[in-house]
């Protein structure tokens, strides 16, 4: 426990010192505010408050930004130490490899959570101030923040996996960029292509929703959309979400951090520094 | 408590088809300083990583303070200094060493240790601003954490200036004095010569020598070189005592260590004809060349 805390506090200090925490929080605040103001137009026509619209826009933003920010911290976690030659030294200490990885994860998740909370929180507060908010839209905001942290957590563990798989930090950065592209962009494009080809057949009705929700980024989107009628209305994603049982997206998103961590831990264990 | 801090017996390791460690047996007693010499790729670092439990071995056994490599007990008993180590540039020396102290579970006097290795003034500066030598000193400071039973130092002098090297060996002596078994992998032969109790030489994964410097010289049978400078006629001196004339004024004789005094007496009998005698015993460099290249001959 002592060692886990030692690693976590040291990682946290690094994130604060190299301005990652500050930069990430600033990015979140700026993007969230920009989307809140730009997306405030349709409020009247849909009959929902401004915070609901804001949450819908920020959900779309978070699908791209949360994985990106997470990968930006995590790609260096193992490969960076290996590059510097300090990985062998670190592993010669009594801390186990799982403990090392968990310590880093705790610090990185806390930093990510801080950036999300401040970013979305600020934008949410501004939207509520100007355009009003109700219990339902506040709930949607809380859900957005919680699921964004969860989504970030998934990509933290996937970043560790990339970091453990590659020999250098540069290679890990490249692989992480590729991973982001696949999960966040190409996966959806591929599915879209398949649906168009299928022309409303069995694939579209039976298989497609499940394949989609297996991707953590899409599970995040579906969860936020399905849980709030207002958000679904403003984001126009109700169709796909309705085809799935309510538990599908939460289960996918909650399972992924464990899968990612286990995979990273497995590869990390085999590394000979 | 066992009387051997580090015990490596018949250890073998394969990497693909290449045998990188072949039946290596080496023990280090508490308080003993052993130098591990060898070319690049001879298997020194691999042996050290096997002792740390960072890489698996495929034959033989290793005991660190009586425990299996990589076990909690072995890790606690071991201190390690990797070759050309660096640390996260955003942390200060004090923060980095504090992290290591907390990882090792020791209550340590961090500022005191940093002052001991000469980083007293730089401890609150970021490691990113450190020179290579300063990073090496920081690495050395973490070796001193707690009271390790075994210290494994991989090329500890690389990047250090001559003064720092003196400091380094003073610290190694201190470690040995408190009962730590010290294994130093090195290229710096002349330093190792004066500062270690025993010398082990590796060649292509095989331990080809493991003895004191005197023992190694005796076994290698390397000749001591006597160079005699003649007062006037080098040819006459050469004719009188044998040996080869190497330039206008000098004659050279090679002899075993046991015949050295006999030869010297013969030379002094020449009286006025000899101006000077220079004696060169075999150096570690010659020994190293002898053992590390034996197979090539």
Image (cartoon, grey):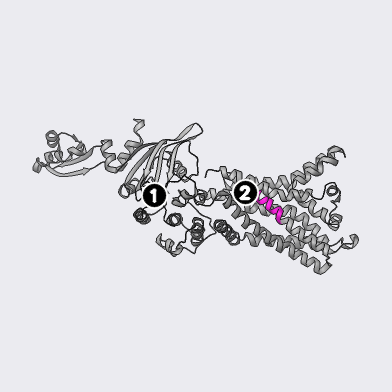
* Residue B179: x %, y % from top left: 36, 53
Which chain letter matches label 2?
Answer: A
Determine whether B10 is above or below B133 in the image: above
Give the residue at the far front of this rendering: B1
- Residue under circle 2? A160
Quadrant housing the C terminus of chain B: top left
- Viewer-closest of A71 and B23: B23
- Secondary structure state at the residue bearing disc 1: loop
The CA span between labels 2 and 1 is 41 Å
- Residue under circle 1? B1
Residues at discs 2 and 1 in contact (Cβ within 8 Å): no
Give, as a single range, the part of the protein colored magenta: A149-163
Which chain letter matches label 1?
Answer: B
Determine whether A138 is above or below B238 in the image: below
Give the residue drawn at x 68%, y 59%.
Answer: A113
- Viewer-closest of A95 and B265: A95
Determine whether A222 is above or below B15 in the image: below
* Residue A109: x %, y % from top left: 65, 56
- Secondary structure state at the residue bearing disc 2: helix
Determine whether A232 is above or below A195 in the image: below
């Amino acid at each position: 426990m002592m060692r886990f805390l030692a690693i976590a506090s040291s990682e946290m200090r690094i994130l604060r010192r190299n301005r990652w925490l500050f930069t990430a929080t600033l990015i979140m605040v700026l993007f969230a505010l920009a989307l809140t103001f730009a997306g405030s137009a349709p409020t009247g026509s849909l009959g929902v408050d401004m915070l609901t619209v804001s949450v819908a826009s920020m959900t779309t933003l978070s699908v791209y930004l949360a994985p990106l920010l997470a990968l930006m911290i995590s790609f260096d976690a193992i490969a960076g130490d290996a590059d510097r030659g300090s990985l062998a030294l670190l592993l010669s200490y009594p801390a186990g490899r799982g403990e090392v990885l968990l310590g880093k994860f705790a610090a990185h998740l806390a930093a990510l959570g801080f950036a999300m909370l401040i970013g979305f929180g600020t934008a949410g507060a501004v939207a509520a101030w100007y355009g009003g908010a109700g219990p339902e839209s506040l709930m949607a905001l809380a859900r957005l923040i919680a699921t964004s942290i969860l989504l970030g957590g998934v990509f933290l563990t996937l970043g560790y996996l990339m970091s453990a798989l590659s020999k250098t930090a540069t290679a890990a950065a490249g692989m992480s960029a590729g991973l982001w592209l696949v999960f966040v962009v190409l996966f959806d494009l591929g599915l879209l292509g398949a649906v168009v080809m299928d022309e409303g057949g069995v694939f579209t009705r039976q298989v497609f929703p499940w394949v989609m929700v297996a991707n953590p980024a899409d599970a995040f989107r579906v969860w936020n959309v399905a849980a709030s009628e207002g958000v679904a209305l403003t984001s126009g994603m109700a169709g796909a979400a309705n085809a799935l049982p309510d538990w599908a997206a939460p289960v996918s998103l909650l399972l992924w951090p464990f899968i990612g961590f286990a995979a990273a831990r497995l590869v990390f264990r085999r590394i000979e520094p | 408590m066992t009387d051997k801090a580090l015990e490596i017996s018949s250890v073998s390791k394969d990497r693909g088809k290449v045998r990188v460690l072949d039946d290596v047996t080496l023990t280090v007693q508490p308080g003993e300083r052993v130098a591990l010499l060898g070319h690049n790729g001879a298997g020194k670092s691999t042996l050290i990583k096997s002792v740390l439990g960072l890489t698996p071995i495929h034959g033989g056994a290793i005991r660190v303070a009586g425990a299996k490599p990589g076990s909690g007990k072995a890790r606690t008993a071991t201190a390690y200094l990797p070759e050309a180590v660096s640390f996260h540039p955003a942390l200060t020396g004090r923060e980095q060493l504090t992290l290591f102290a907390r990882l090792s579970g020791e209550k340590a006097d961090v500022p005191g240790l940093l002052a001991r290795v000469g980083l007293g003034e730089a401890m609150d500066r970021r490691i990113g601003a450190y020179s290579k030598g300063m990073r090496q000193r920081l690495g050395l400071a973490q070796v001193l954490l707690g009271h390790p039973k075994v210290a494994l130092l991989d090329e500890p002098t690389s990047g250090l200036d001559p003064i720092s090297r003196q400091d380094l060996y003073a610290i190694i002596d201190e470690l040995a004095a408190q009962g730590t078994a010290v294994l130093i992998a090195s290229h710096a032969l002349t330093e190792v010569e004066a500062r270690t109790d025993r010398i082990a030489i590796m060649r292509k994964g095989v331990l080809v020598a493991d003895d004191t410097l005197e023992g190694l010289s005796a076994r290698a049978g390397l000749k001591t070189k006597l160079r005699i400078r003649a007062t006037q006629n080098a040819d006459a001196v050469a004719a009188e005592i044998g040996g080869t004339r190497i330039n206008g004024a000098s004659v050279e004789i090679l002899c075993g260590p046991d015949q050295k005094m006999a030869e010297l007496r013969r030379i002094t009998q020449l009286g006025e004809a000899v101006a000077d005698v220079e004696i060169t015993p075999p150096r570690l460099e010659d020994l190293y060349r002898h053992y590390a290249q034996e197979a090539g001959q």
